[in-house]
Image (tube, rainbow, N blue to C red):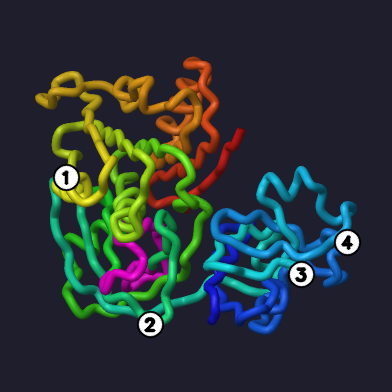
Amino acid sequence: MTHSIALNFEDGVTRFIEARAGETVADASYRLGINIPLDCRDGACGTCKCRVESGRYDGGSYIEDALTEEEAASGLALACQMRPESDLVLAILASSAVCKTAGQSFATVLRGVERLSETSIAFTLDAPAGLTFLPGQYVNLRVPGTDERRSYSFSSAPGDATLSFLVRDIPRGRMSTWLREGAEPGTSMEFTGPAGSFYLRDVKRPLLFLAGGTGLAPFLSMLGKLAAAGTSQPVHLVYGVTNDLDLVGVADLEAFAARIPGFTFSTCVAAEDSAHPRKGYVTAHVQPLHLHGGEVDVYLCGPPPMVDAVRAWLAAQGVTPANFHYEKFSPSAPTTTGRLAA
């Protein structure tokens, strides 16, 4: 039996490897040419320390100087000693370049483009062989006919036959213009990835998802994963947009609400002249029950002002979530990710 291991590097690059039965993470990595930090291989130096984001494993044997009891309890482990007992997601405390690896490139073709509103476009690609990603991650997609790339989060779930993306239609944007004016099914496309540290971890407590605009995309991917895998924890999503015409994907959320027990959602529109029944920003529509007294994992994806506003709002509420994962995005700019944890 083999287990899939996602190695998520500090620069956002993710590589997937397969560990054979009884094989340590370090041995599997080096067998496949990925040189994660390593010195002794005996659990004595601590150089290969990594953070386990999800999955089960046998931590092996090591000395206290290499890994303290407190570190092990917090989710750190030694790659030279740990043996997977399930699929794993690991945060490697080094860049992909240092580990002599890089993001993978994939070739595919455009399946279709759908105009969702005056401001939003969805498009789909064939899923290339060998692609694996974590729900919430993104790819760097080359704009056909140029050398420019744009970062887009998957809105499809891992394992789907097609890859889907939800993007904002920017009037003079390179990719937006191509999707509007030149895109035809069957066009060759190319991207690198997957990438990003904004992805769904093991669900151990209630979840609060906060989406702004096309920041809904990674949550659709996460919900697809939850629908397939199931969860016993409550999940609530608040989805906010600027104007009424920006509100898309509601039918998808309704479908997930029917499939995922315990999943609820609400939408809101910030514009004062909106006809929507719920106005204002997402923080105005988060109820105390959604925060579970801080025993909650918060995931937030939206433009930088929204991320900063939510962080300030949580502080004002006197609530520190168990984990706070966020992703900031802006038009035509690389995605940036972060993580705050208690």
Closer to the camera: disc 2 or disc 4? 4
Residue 172 shows which numbered tag? none
Q: Quadrant of residue 264?
A: top left
Q: Position of residue 25 (x, y in %)?
A: 67, 71
Q: Which quadrant does the N terminus fall into?
A: bottom right
Q: Secondary structure at mark 2?
A: loop
In the rendered image, residue 155 lying in the magenta stretch gets the answer yes
Callout 3 crowding tier (Cα within 10 Å): few <14, some 14–19, many ≥20: many
Residue 129 shows which numbered tag? 2
Q: Is residue 194 left or right of residue 170?
A: right
Q: Secondary structure at mark 1?
A: helix
**CA gap, disc 1 to disc 2?**
31 Å
Closer to the camera: disc 2 or disc 3? 3
Q: Secondary structure at mark 4?
A: loop
Q: Position of residue 154 (x, y in %)?
A: 35, 59
Callout 4 crowding tier (Cα within 10 Å): few <14, some 14–19, many ≥20: some
**CA gap, disc 2 to disc 4?**
38 Å
| Between discs 3 and 1, the one toward the N terminus | 3
| Between discs 2 and 4, the one toward the N terminus | 4
Q: Which residue is mark 1?
A: 254
Dots 1, 2 in contact, CB < 8 A:
no
| Between discs 2 and 3, the one toward the N terminus | 3
Q: Is residue 120 visible?
A: no
Q: Which residue is mark 4?
A: 45
Q: Quadrant of residue 166?
A: bottom left
In the depicted structure, whether residue 165 falls above or below residue 240: below
Q: Position of residue 110 (x, y in %)?
A: 24, 74
Say what amino acid the circle numbered 3 marks: Cys
**CA gap, disc 3 to disc 4?**
10 Å
